[in-house]
Amino acid sequence: MEDQPPKPIKELIWFSLISTSIKLLLLPSYHSTDFEVHRNWLAITNSHPLSQWYSDTTSPWTLDYPPFFAYFELFLSLFAAKIDPTIVNLHKGLNYKADSVVYFQRITVIVSDLVLHYAIYRITRKLDSTKRRLIWVLVIWSPALFIVDHMHFQYNGFLLGLLLVSISALMEGRDLMGGFFFAVLLCFKHLFAVAAPVYFVYLLRHYCRGGLIKGFGRFLMMGLAVVVVFAAAFGPFVYHDQMLQVIHRMFPFGRGLCHAFWAPNFWVFYIMADKLLAFFLRSMGFNVQRPTGSFTSGLVGDSSPFAVLPQITPLMTFMMVLLAISPCLFKAWKNPRPRKIARWIAYAYSCGFVFGWHVHEKAMLHFLIPLAINAVDSINDACHYLLISIVSCYSLFPLLFEAREYPIKVTLLLLHCILMWFGFSIFSEVTTTNSKKDLQKKNDELRTEENLGISEKGGFGIGWIYKSYLIGIVAVEIWGQFLHPYILGNKLPFLPLM
């Protein structure tokens, strides 16, 4: 028994080394404009005083992440300046593609992934070996993270690591720590705020309890922790009278409803419906505006209006996301249970993915990675995750559009499918070793006590909503990818050019 604690760490190191080997092989692969975005942020934070970080316009790829990520870029720039000064040069470094900058930025992503590895270790350290290894396969060897972070280029593994640290603390009953790390995460990337309502309701009901005085005291303590984090992040910018500029950069609502690399979500069908209506009304002689070729945009001020359907505003999408999350908030308020928090947070991020404003394809990572924690809760959860993981990874394929990357992304997905299939098969065998009586009892409990399932009284619970929602996400992503080229242009799949 004394030798058991170090064993998971040794296994995790083995998983991490294999993952790192794959990432090193991907160093020379294609990278998107996000690579230059982050290089430019290195130059901005290294070349300018803090008061000018959010006002620099040397490059169109301006700094638009919260201050903690800017501090992170400043920290990295100290090493970049010593390796190759051109990397942090505002003007000479524009579109710099030397091997030094490629290897430096790629390796910083690999190193920052250690936060994710630590977080997943925290969550799985008390699980049995089968469940633990399966979750490691789903997260550490996730093809979606390989594609987005180590080819397309971003730091999602690092940020998701912070999210999982927060979730692990909540699952352990350490609510103050969980709230603190979520506040830290928001100051790194504000798009994770979609889950803020879940955090607020859960912490209010689970942490701020124990009577009026004790509950109010805990509420103040949690509020103080959050205020300290936000003060550390935004305080210097308030001091330099830059807060409005920071907010303007962080929330560029002038961008279009859909991102240039847009998420295949609900708005795909809304846009397609607008084009279909415009076509039929124009063919019937109505004076209807011809729909523009693109509803996507990556830059501020470049968005397209609808021809027939009502214009969608950021406020509308916010209300739709909040409405979609509301069943989850009700369950968190009624019965806040730590072992369900990962599921609720993943559900919230899936709502943001489907109904949010200017959502990127990469946003599917926000719910796919937390859902991996619940994939080993039951065979039903494993089946749901298998389906949604495959489709979500497939939806990322347009990010890598060069021919030489096609075999890589297909191979990564196929290998992951094989590993998931074998992993879930072993998990199913282990689960079914219980007696039929125990298994029936467990299934009954899952059907009656599941926080996102049918109620004990047999009434209609939100379990049906949750399952339908997972199926809906899959359907939307598949059809969204099919409609992708037609949304970017005026040609419809079954109609002549308008």
Image: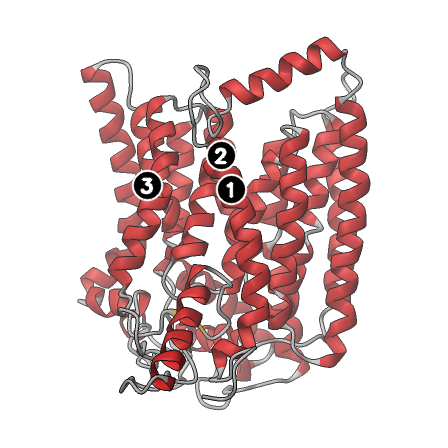
Residue 484: x percent and y percent? 54, 73
**Mark toward the viewer: 1 or 3:** 1
Question: Which is nearer the N-term, disc 3 or disc 2?
Answer: 3
- Mark number displayed over residue 468: 1
Answer yes or no: is residue 207 visible. Answer: no
Q: CB atoms at circles 1 and 2 under 8 Å apart?
A: yes
Q: Amino acid at mark 1?
A: Ser
* Disc 1/disc 2 C-alpha distance (Å): 6 Å
Dot 3 falls on a residue whose secondary structure is helix
Residue occupying the point 74% across, 53% down: 19
Q: Up-down: is 448 above or below 314? A: above
Crowd tier of the residue under label 2, counting other residues whose Cα lies within 10 Å: few below 14, some 14–19, many 20 or above: few
**Mark toward the viewer: 3 or 2:** 2
Dot 1 falls on a residue whose secondary structure is helix
Answer yes or no: is residue 136 visible. Answer: yes
Q: CB atoms at circles 3 and 2 under 8 Å apart?
A: no
Q: Amino acid at mark 2?
A: Trp
What residue did someone put label 2 on? 464
Residue 8: x percent and y percent? 73, 32
Q: Which image quarter holds the N terminus? A: top right
